[in-house]
Image (cartoon, coloured by chain):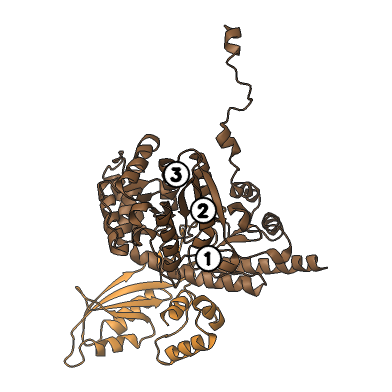
Amino acid sequence: MSKSGSSHIKASQSHISERVSALPPSGIRKFFDLLSSIEGVISLGVGEPDFVTPWHIREAAIYSLEKGYTMYTSNKGTPELRAELASHLESRFGLTYDPDNEILITVGVSEGVDLAARAILNPGDEVLMPDPCYVAYPASVSLAGGIPIQVPTTEENDFKITADDIEPRITQRTKAILLGYPCNPTGAVLSKEELTQIAELAKRYNLLVISDEVYGRLVYGVEHTCLASLPGMRERTILLNGFSKAYAMTGWRIGYAASDSEIVGAMTKIHQYTMLCASIMGQMAAIEALKAGDSEVEAMVREYDRRRRVIVKGFRDIGLSCFEPKGAFYAFPSIKITGMTSEEFAEKLLMEEKVAVVPGSAFGQCGEGYIRCCYATSLPEIEEALKKMGRFVERHRKAKNR
Amino acid sequence: MKQIFEALEKDARLTAEQISTMTGISVAEVKKSIKKAEEDRAVLKYKAVIDWAKLGEEQVLALVEVKVVPQRDVGFDAIAERIYRFPQARSVYLASGTYDLAVLVAGKSMQEIAVFVSQKLAPLETVQGTVTHFILKKYKEDGEIFEGGEGIKRLPVTP
């Protein structure tokens, strides 16, 4: 018995799949462990608002619990939330989606990215995406068996991905372009014209576009253009969005996907087996957010804008070049004058001045030489952090030039 | 323009330079707008929200409902003026509902407030009656929560 059994014992020592083993760990995670051991840190390393979810939204969720809404919902999400979303997309962007089969409620945009990748990719299919970009994009594509192809973006070009940079990287295997604008980590925004050029490319090469617009409400002095609203793009766009950033609802984990029924149907198939449905409490809260959350969103945007201007000017004053981010709540200054790598800079800054930032290299090779600083934190903290960083940069710039 | 005063209302100690950075409006323009607003009394004054109890100082507040007889030609304005001239009256509002004027009265003791209401406020000619509510505890003032604010419970680093 043991003899015949032994022939089935695998040579490999590892119980972990090759696909997962090959996946690099998140650069952010490593930093988090270091940070947890230090007290009194000012953190610009977060990726979420410092506002608590507006009270009327929380109250709606509490009320739903009191009324006994504790069960599963439809796989696609509650009909009421999908209907609200359909009218929201109609009034904001003039887009019509059938709430019955073209909208899916997901567990945050994170699940949306994963579902989109798994729904459309065959093994070896390529997905083009900007570098630097949100850490989950390349990972989700790899996990779905696809190959992430990163398109470099630069500070000189305000970290915008362009049709000209995308086109030479399109191959027979290219299935989709994955965009996340306004961009985490850079704060870059694409204009309607720039998006139109990318849309033309997608149409010409018959590509899908996965568009993560979770920061779409957080733009400053510019308009957010929904990619799906461009001519001919609705049917080839998988629009992903959620409530985390605009309504300060990160912990609720509610997002959505909107696209044509074939794609949403495929995504729903995976979602029903792996997730079943998003939490009902979160969905109840999201309905309230859509119905009555606009004034709070606008107030938060005005507050972020004040902080954004303070932090960008602050970086420039201490000698760090910093392009003006027009969206999200991140600034992405260059730290090249110190001669350090992003990781070194972030680690030393944390140890010496107790200020946490995220190394730009965590978001791709093109993020090397930059740091991501979240300004969704109070103004006094931002000012204190800038003071400390100024001291730090001064010290290390001198050390380098000596 | 509105952005200047929104920033100032949140923190009256901001300098013109800081407001300029936050709004993108030039320092000179910020200074000019604030000066004009002060002259027009659109900005009335700059104050702090203080938890006096925490400083060990006693302060008694009462919300006094005042029912009055409005007068020909001047309506409630004349009686409101008679009342707001008293320094004890911190705030005076005309309100809809079962009474007319809501007067927030501050004093060092309940006795002091009682004397003010009975000797000064209630005897005024057109005042028909008063109801005094002593404030027992302050939870929130000018948008600031006194105790047990929610704090920020987020993790220091997130993607």
Q: Which mark is residue A26?
A: none
- Give the orange chain's letter: B
Determine whether, in the image, residue A47 is placed left or right of residue A64: right
Which badge, 1 or 3, is on the more N-terminal residue?
A: 3
Q: Mark 2 lies on which chain?
A: A
> Which amino acid does the dot numbered 2 rest on?
Met
Q: Which residue is drawn at 36% across and 62% down?
A: A230
Q: Residue A129 carries which label?
A: 2
> Image check: A382 left or right of A299?
right
First-in-chain label (1 vs 2): 2
* 3D distance between C-alphas at marks 1 and 3: 37 Å
From the image, state the color of chain A. brown
A267 relative position to A381: left or right: left
Could you give the CA–CA distance between mark 2 and mark 3, rounded to whole angstroms? 12 Å
Q: Is residue B131 above or below residue A184?
A: below
Extreme top residue here? A1
